[in-house]
Amino acid sequence: LIIVALVMVVAPSGYFGPISSRVRGLFVKHTKTGNPLVDSVAEHQPASSKAYYQYLHNICLLAPLGFLSVMTNLSDASSFLLVYGTFAYFFSHKMVRLILLTAPIASVLAGLTIGRFVGYIVGAIWGTTVGRPSILTSIFFMDVNQTLMESENDNDDNALVPPLPSSTTPKNTTTTTKSKKAKKNTKKSSSSNVEETTSDTVVTATPLKEESSDNYVARLIRLGVCAYAIMEGIPYVQDFVTTSQDMAVSMSHPSIIMKGTTRDGREVTVDDYRQAYWWLRDNTPEDARIMAWWDYGYQITAIANRTTIADGNTWNHEHIALLGKTLTTDMDEGYEIARHMADYVLVWGGGGGDDLAKSPHMRRIANSVYRDMCPGDPTCRSFGFSQMGPTPSMSTSLLYKLHSHQQQQGVEADRNRFRMVYQSSHGKVRIFKVMSVSKESKAWVADPANLECDAEGSWFCRGHYPPGLQKILSEKQDFAQLEDFNRGTAGGDSDYQKQYMENLNNPEKAQQAAAREAAAHVNANKQQKIPKLKPEEIEKLNKHWEDSELTSMMWEVANTNDLPGLRTILQNEPGVVHMRSTDGRGIMWWAHEYGRQKLVSILKRLGVSETLKDANGQTPLDISTL
């Protein structure tokens, strides 16, 4: 009680840190911790039955049987197994990385299952308790037992009592009734205990003979069933041993070197990641700063021996958000941030879990601090891919430009800002040199006077952002975790958290809210004039019908009502709204088809016609749902 009272007194002062989202994620659904950074980590996802079988194999099938068998024989020791098993399964089911904690208890419970089964077989062969002799005993003494049974029918019950040893006194010859009374007396002397044993032996002789024949047949059947089960289980045992050995070998290999198969069926060694890190080590200055998503930070530091902008120590949420903003914002803003922070940008490509697949999470994390990234939708649903390709905000992002540089038609990074200096043999890693790096910012960061050390001469020193980033940093809003009770009501972020949760639970409502916020965002940025085309330029575009990436982007804008994305595209391609696909339709048709009133109004102001006809002779007004 004293400790509880002390905690209650100290807690309001902020002495105890907040419960981290990683711990909180053990008690809520994975995607709903309220922290997009925690929600982005694959290892924090709930475990599936496939994951259990992958890491535990047949153990996950036997462990539940062992758990049930322990419940039938409760004790202090078995209760520990039940508690351990329950908690291990609960937490591993919430977070896949914790299957590691399930392995010991799962092995113990599976061992209990196998042990009970082996005991069942041994009992069938050698017998178990008094009255259930082994099969060999039953066979060897079958004739004797038969004679005793016949003798029992011809004589009274006392005839079954065998001659007593000469050393036994007459008072040791007791009847069945007396033996039963003797069993109730538990506080006898040692000599009385001898009497009980003798009389018990006499009495239990009869059931031994009566049941021996039945036990013999039943146990033979049981033995046969067990033998069949063992024969059927041998392949499973062999498979388990083979899988365990293969798993041990695969987990012993470096995670950055793996085997792959080419399209023509050839097996190759994919060594792209190590090659890229060694290239950095051998071809960049020792003070080079490498910008990459935080997943690879430790590898860059350890293998390439270069400074990385972020690594797995993601305690600084705002710093990770700035990195996410740099990579997922447009090329212009991304470059302005990168030139003050890094000398090179490393991007993972090649499909699978590359940076492009992770980019929606990067955008969400960035938006949790820089709220203009995804106005109206903390889940950033307008940033990604659809059946038509990348959304407008995705296609203009710095990461997409670097990832798909000269890989997708019409996609190329600005060579005056980013120059590709390395690409791995299988295209898994690309490295770009940042052009015109700010020398002032680099010198400012390296100056010891700008470091904040915990003690004079200490190696632990906290750095600060250079003055060149102050304009960007002034736009941020520090992220408040849902469980940070030290903040109290001041400085909280309950509105953002509430909207984040609602959007995850109701995607349709989130999409509508994002559209409304996007329209407001467009109105707030009207001062940014979009260049208008001359009539002859518009007429030329209207006459050229072609399916292209730009027309696909316009369809995506109308489909998702991505007004901020449209404005970004118009800054670089003002004529895109007049382009038409091979069926003669353009964004005005699609805006009417999907009922986008605000988008239609914007297109009218840009001079897009509603009276032009498509290949079927239909105007946008003919198919309008407004």
Image (cartoon, rainbow, N blue to C red):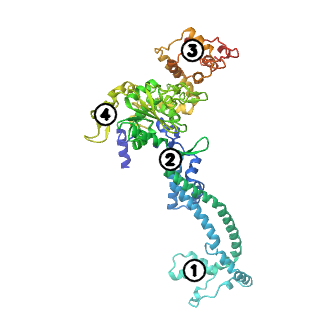
Residue that carries the numbered disc 3 in the rendered image: 603
Instruction: Determine the CA span between mark 1 and mark 2.
Output: 57 Å
Instruction: Determine the CA span between mark 2 and mark 4.
Output: 38 Å
Q: Nearer the viewer, mark 1 or mark 2?
A: 2
Residue that carries the numbered disc 2 in the rendered image: 97
Amino acid tagged 4 = Ala
Amino acid tagged 3 = Leu
Q: Earlier in the sequence, mark 1 or mark 2?
A: 2
Q: Nearer the viewer, mark 3 or mark 1?
A: 3
Residue that carries the numbered disc 4 in the rendered image: 446
Q: Earlier in the sequence, mark 4 or mark 1?
A: 1
Instruction: Give the camera-side residue of 14 and 603.
Output: 603
Amino acid tagged 2 = Arg
**Can residue 445 be seen here?**
yes
66 versus 121 height, above or below: above
In percent of width and height, residue 425 lies at 51, 39
Q: Earlier in the sequence, mark 4 or mark 3?
A: 4
Q: Earlier in the sequence, mark 3 or mark 1?
A: 1
Instruction: Determine the CA span between mark 3 and mark 2.
Output: 50 Å
Q: Is residue 443 left or right of residue 404?
A: left
Q: Tell me whether circle 3 and circle 2 mark residues in contact (CB < 8 Å).
A: no
In percent of width and height, residue 50 lies at 59, 47
Q: Which secondary structure lies at badge 3? A: helix
Instruction: Give the camera-side residue of 168 and 285.
Output: 285
Give the crowd class for mark 2: few <14, some 14-19, many >=20 residues within 10 Å: some
Q: Residue furthest bottom?
A: 166
In percent of width and height, residue 192 lies at 53, 81
Q: Earlier in the sequence, mark 3 or mark 2?
A: 2
Residue that carries the numbered disc 1 in the rendered image: 197
Q: Tell me whether circle 4 and circle 1 mark residues in contact (CB < 8 Å).
A: no
Q: Quadrant of the C terminus?
A: top right
